[in-house]
Amino acid sequence: MQPQRLLFSCLTLWSLWSAAWTARILLVFPYDFPSQCMLLTPYIRALVERGHELTLIHAFNNCDVVHEVHAIYAKDRQFKINDWFEHEVTPSISKFGQLASLLKYLVKMHLNVLEDPQVQQLMRSGVSYDLFIIEPSYTDALFGLAAHFNATAMGLATCGADWNMDGLVGYKSSSALETISSSISFKPDAGLLDQLYNWMQISEEWLLQQLIFLPQLRSVHTHFFGHLAQSFEQNRQSFSLILLNQHFSLFESRANVPGMVEVGGMHVPKQLPALAPQLARFIAEAEHGVVYISLGNELQSKDLSAKTLQVLLHTFESLPQRVIWRFETEATPNASSNIYFGQWLPQQAILAHPNLRLFINHGGMLSIIEAAHYGKPMLGLPLFFDQARNVERLVLEGTALSLDINALTKHSFDHALRQLLCQPQYRLRAQALSQRVRDVPLHPLDSAIYWTEYVLRYKGAAHMRVSSANIKLTDYYCLDHLLIIFVRFGLIFLLVVYILFKLKSYSHRHIYFGLN
């Protein structure tokens, strides 16, 4: 039997066996980020198709999948979004100003969930769940919901792994291999000065986490979950599984533990939707190919300054390629007929088209994965959080270039576009990367569902978990071994010193008696 047919047969049997039982699952996704909705949508639909009963606590303003399950909308009663973005996307604000606004945002985000009347009613209802799934990035004060509902804790990490994520499954990674935060760049093969800079960045992030972020989140946790037998620290180390939206074929290879599973690409559909006839014709009839630009949802094209907008527009009009531009309002700039504007565009269907030559985007995690999956060269215009790190990965792969959108000029933008469009090595490297990313034994969504149900089948799969709480400090750092080594070498050192002292005393006495 061919390996593919054998794998399909095994998956079919697994599907039939697993579908015979269902679980009650509580999902909590408190960020109003469209990218999380896009990642979560196929995952939720797959769980529903397998018969599981889902309750979703969310903050999405526009996400179709919330209407397909029992959902509780944690309304933004704290006006948290404005607190963060009015500072985060402003280049002139200081780092401490960004830190203060981010901390305020995180606390208010937790309060939006925990003070919501429907959430409060659910907590008082006495119901229990088999599984609790949450976006684990800086949502620590919500982890008490798992213990409150007597559920196994599990995470779905939109931005991949970092130190904070590793600690949730009891794994302590080395700063030589992995950064503490998704928001900072990391160069493991850097020179001495770069290593010193890395160490300063890591130390700063660690201190911020330990002295500012975690104490604030611990206070929120204590207020709402002080009745639990488990402490804040115990709930933070109780995760049985974290699904990571990354994969070693694209991002840095990392030391791993069984409780952390890479499922990067799980949002990529197995079958692409068809393009609208007008859009399909616009792409197919482009003699020199098509450039596609989408700046994401946090900073949209309509929010660009007039100067930046004119730089983009004039440069696009000078290209021989046609341009598809995701523009979020009906009122679009006056432009030539080679530019196609659309508010909602089927991004992956566009990227999959063979006539698509270049993808311009903000460097969001999903866009990076899609650019790699469909083998398209990319121009990154990162702004904040993990975007610079994401774009840097494709720059290192030789499939992308990066520009600062706040310092964009027509010359720099035009030069980068023509370099990516005219030099074939970018396209060839992107195609090679696509082949590598696609070479997996199982679709990432199927892998995510398998491991989710694996944890359910084995009641939390305690055999997968690494709990640092059960490891003594002396054992983790091998202090007992070091003590034995120090004692042995110390005794030898003292013995040598004693012998030398005796020899010196003997020689002095011998010389003294010889002179007399």
Image (cartoon, grey):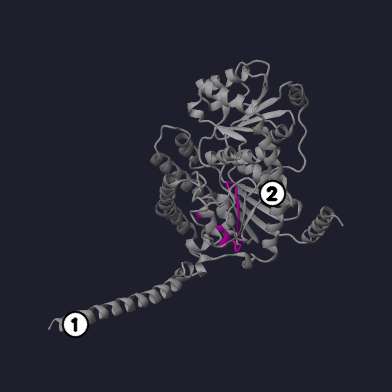
Position in image of residue 504 (x %, y %): 24, 78
Q: Examine the structure image and report whether residue 192 is included in the region drawn in magenta.
A: no
Q: In the depicted view, which residue is nearer to us: 44 or 239?
A: 239
Q: Which tag, 1 or 2, sits closer to the chain's start?
A: 2
Residue with the mark numbered 1 = 509
Position in image of residue 345 (x %, y %): 68, 30
Q: In the depicted view, which residue is nearer to us: 309 or 488?
A: 488
Instruction: Give the secondary structure at mark 1.
Output: helix
Task: Report the amino acid beneath label 1.
Answer: Arg
Mark whose residue sits in front, 1 or 2: 1
Q: Which residues are magenta?
A: 139-159
Task: Report the amino acid beneath label 2.
Answer: Tyr
Instruction: Give the secondary structure at mark 2.
Output: helix
Tag shown at residue 43: 2
Position in image of residue 79 (x %, y %): 49, 39
Image height of 420 relative to 186, above or below: above
